[in-house]
Image (cartoon, rainbow, N blue to C red):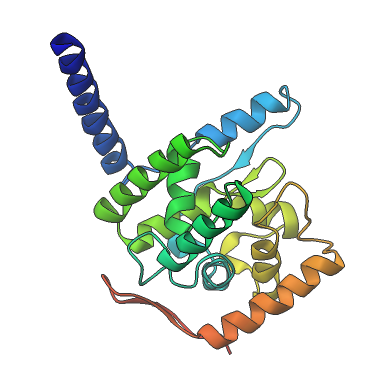
Amino acid sequence: MKKVFRVLIKTCLWFFTLSVLWVVTYKWMDVRTTPLMWIRHIQSEGEIHNKHQWVPLKKISKNLQLAVICSEDQKFVSHNGFDTKAIKRVIEKYSSEKRIRGASTISQQTAKNVFLWPRRSWIRKGLEVYFTFLIETFWSKERILEVYLNSIEMGNGIYGAEAASQFWYSKTAENLTEDQAAAIAAILPNPRKYLADPPSNYIQKRKKWIRKQMYNYGSVVFKKKNTTIPKLK
């Protein structure tokens, strides 16, 4: 038993050390690929070739930055990686329905997309919490948003803001309009099913709601560096 215990301790220490190094490396290094990209490619049996191009946050439209925050996680700049109220609702739902439902913040989605796999389970959720804690510890909010906007699915085989902008609107991510940004944000719950252009009636309704949220939300202030996203006019 002592030998087994020592092996477990060593394994945990190695996992902790390597995971911290992995997260710290991505504090500066561009995330060129993710487990999700490989999984989707394998699932398609090579028929879908991933489109992905990393760009710095300053090259991503302020409209899109604000749109995804308003649609996905309006407490992003103020929370520590977790929305406690949403988590409580998930626990209550699980108690009654015995199903794992999402309540992920942008930080949690970033942790999942970059370091883990998409299939839901309590093991993955536990690791998601762990990696979310790490990125909130070692990365700035700007870096989390930058990685998020460069790694999430924004269409079938489309990853990140630049590839999505080119695919949906034949323009760079830097030049997305408010309406186009809201359309891309609107499809994020299921980007392989919904189309940003042409939008369905459902996506049109989500766009309208997101644009209203963008107007009401106003400026986004990243407290650590005091970087602002100007209020839309």
Q: Nearer the viewer, residue 194 or 104?
A: 104
Asked whether residue 233 is in view, the answer is yes
Quarter of the view holding residue 76? bottom left
Of residues 81 and 169, the one nearer the viewer is 81
Q: Is residue 181 above or below residue 42?
A: below
Q: In which quarter of the image is the N terminus?
A: top left
Tell me what residue is drawn at x 50 percent, y 85 percent. 218
Left or right, residue 151 beside residue 132: right
Rendered location of residue 215, percent (x, y): 58, 86
The quadrant of the image that shows the C terminus is bottom right
Q: Which residue is drawn at 65% across and 29% down?
A: 41
Looking at the image, which residue is at 74% across and 56% down? 168
Q: Is residue 198 left or right of residue 151?
A: right
Measured from the top left, where is residue 47 in percent x and y? 76, 27
Q: In this view, does 181 lie above or below 219?
A: above
Q: Tell me, yes or no, if residue 31 can be seen here.
A: no
Look at 27% across and 71% down and name the residue there. Answer: 225
